[in-house]
Image (cartoon, helix red, strand yellow):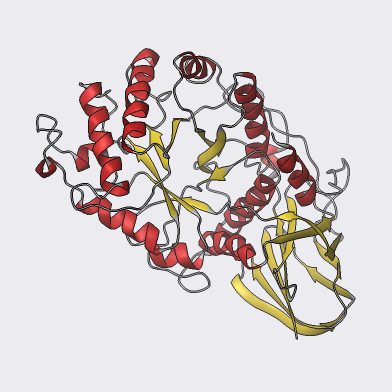
Amino acid sequence: MKATSASLAAVVLVAIGTAYAGAEESAARHISIDATVTVGALRPLSGVQAADAEGAPFYRAARVDLVRISEVAGAGDIDVIFPDMNADVENPKSYHFEPTDRLVASIKKGGAEPLFRLGQSANGGANPPADPDKWAQIVRHVVLHYNAAWNKGFRYGIRYWEVWNAPDSKLFWNGTPEEYYALYAKTAQAIETADASALVGGPALSRPLIAGAYREKFMDFVRLNRLPLDFFSWHFYAVDSNDPYLFVTIARQLRTILDAHGFGSTKNVLDQWDVDPADQDLSKAGRASFATSSLIYMLGGPVDAQTFHRADAAARTVGGGADEIDSALGTFGALKSTPVLIRTDGGDEAGFAVVAGRSKDGRGIQVLISNYQIASKYLRPRDNWDTTLPERRVLQYHDNGGYDATISVPAGRYQVKRYRISDSNNFVLTEQSVESGPTVRLQAAMPPPAVELIVLSAR
C-alpha cells in the first residue's frame, strides 16, 4: 500500500486499544480529538450497490460517491440491453437501453458515479456467452452509448467497467477459468477501443481468500497478456463472525498479492459486503453500527473503493423514511462536510471506531463514533475452521459502555449537537448545548450497538 494510505491508517486508528481478557463492558471510553492538528484528507469512500432505479434522493442525501450496478431487475444486464443474441451488433435497433438509462440517470442525478458490472444478475443464468467475440462487441457499444453518445446516448464518462460477477461461484459462472480469462481479454480490449480512459477490472471474487485460478492465476494471465487490470474487485460477507475489521484484514492480504504480481497501481475494490446474511440475531442498529465501524476502519486500510450491499432506500431521505442502516450510511457520508481529518485517540480495532474532521474554513467539526460489539457466540475459535473464512478473533470487551470525549478546538463558542442511532433511536438529535473552547468535554452513556455523530459549529 502507498505510504499515504499507511499514514491514513494511523490517522483513523491512532493509539488503538486492545480488547483485554477478563474485563467486562461498563466504563466509558476515554477519547480525545484535536481539531488543531490536521492529519490527512477524507477520501471518497461512500459507496452502495444499487437496488432500483429510483435511488437518487437517497444517494444525494447520503452523499454517496459510487453505485455498483448489479441485481437491478430489468436494468444493467447485458441480456436485457441486448435481448436477441442473433441480432446485428452494429444495428442501434438491436439494443434496449431504456431501463438501464433510467438507472444510470438516477445515479448521476444523485451525485454518484456508476460502477458498471458487465454480466447478468443473480438467477440470470451462469452460462458463459456462447459467442465471446460478439459479447465483447456488445459491451463496446454499451460503453459507446454511455460515454460517447452512440445511439442517442450520453457522455457520462463512466470510469469503472467490471467484467462479469463472481466467476469463482457456480451461481454466476459454470464455465472454466480459461473461458473466463478469454472473455476478460476480449472484453477489456473492446472497452479500451471504446474509451481509452476507462478503468477495466474484475473478477468480483466471491471467495477472496481462496488462492488459485481466479486470483493468482488470473493475475498471471492478465500480466502475461499485457491486459489492463485497473481495479481488482472482490466480495465478502462477515459470515460466522460479524467482525467489522475483517474487510481491512482481507484487503491487506490482497494488496500484498497484487503488489507481488506487479499490480502495485491496481485499485483494491470491495464492491459487495455486509454482515452474515444468515444471522437473524443482529438488530437494525447492530447492522448500522457494524457498517459504520467497518467503514471507519476501511478509511485507514487499503480499500480504494467500496459499495455496501445494499441500499434499499429508494426515494427515502436520511433521518426521514430511512431505516437505521440507511441513516448510518448517510451519517458516514456527512463527513464530507468536514473533509480535513483531525487527530483522534481512543478507538480500537474491536468495534469501537472513531474518526473526526473539520471543515475547510475551520468553523465546523464532526466526530463520528461507532460502538459495535461482536456477539459472544463468535468470540471463540471455530471447531472446524473453514479455510474460505478468516479465523475468528478471541476478544473480550472493556470500557465501551459510553464515551468521555475531550475535544481541543480553537478558542470560541460552539453550538454542539449530538445525533444517535441505536436500538431506540434512528438518527435522533439527543442533545444540544453551547460550549466554549479551547477544550470541550462531552460525555454520554452509549452501550453497543450505537452510532453517534457529534457536530460542533462555531458561533
In which image quadrant can residue 227 be found? top left
Is 177 situated left or right of 274 in this image?
left
Where does the image place residue 96, in percent across and percent down from the top left? 16, 46
Give the residue displayed 20% in from the left and 49% down from the top. 97
Where does the image place residue 378, in percent across and percent down from the top left? 67, 38
Vertical comparison of 344 with 306: above or below: below
Residue 250 appears in the figure: yes
Give the residue displayed 54% in from the left and 27% down from the top. 208
Is 166 situated left or right of 384 in this image?
left
User: Which quadrant of the rendered structure holds the N terminus?
Assistant: top right
Is 348 situated left or right of 368 in this image?
right
Residue 349 appears in the figure: no
User: Number of numbered discs present?
Assistant: 0
In which image quadrant can residue 441 be found? bottom right
Where does the image place residue 83, in percent across and percent down from the top left? 15, 38
User: Which quadrant of the rendered structure holds the C terminus?
Assistant: bottom right
Where does the image place residue 239, in percent across and percent down from the top left? 56, 36
Give the residue displayed 62% in from the left and 22% down from the top. 257
Q: Nearer the viewer, residue 10 or 454?
A: 10
Q: Nearer the viewer, residue 50 or 42?
A: 42
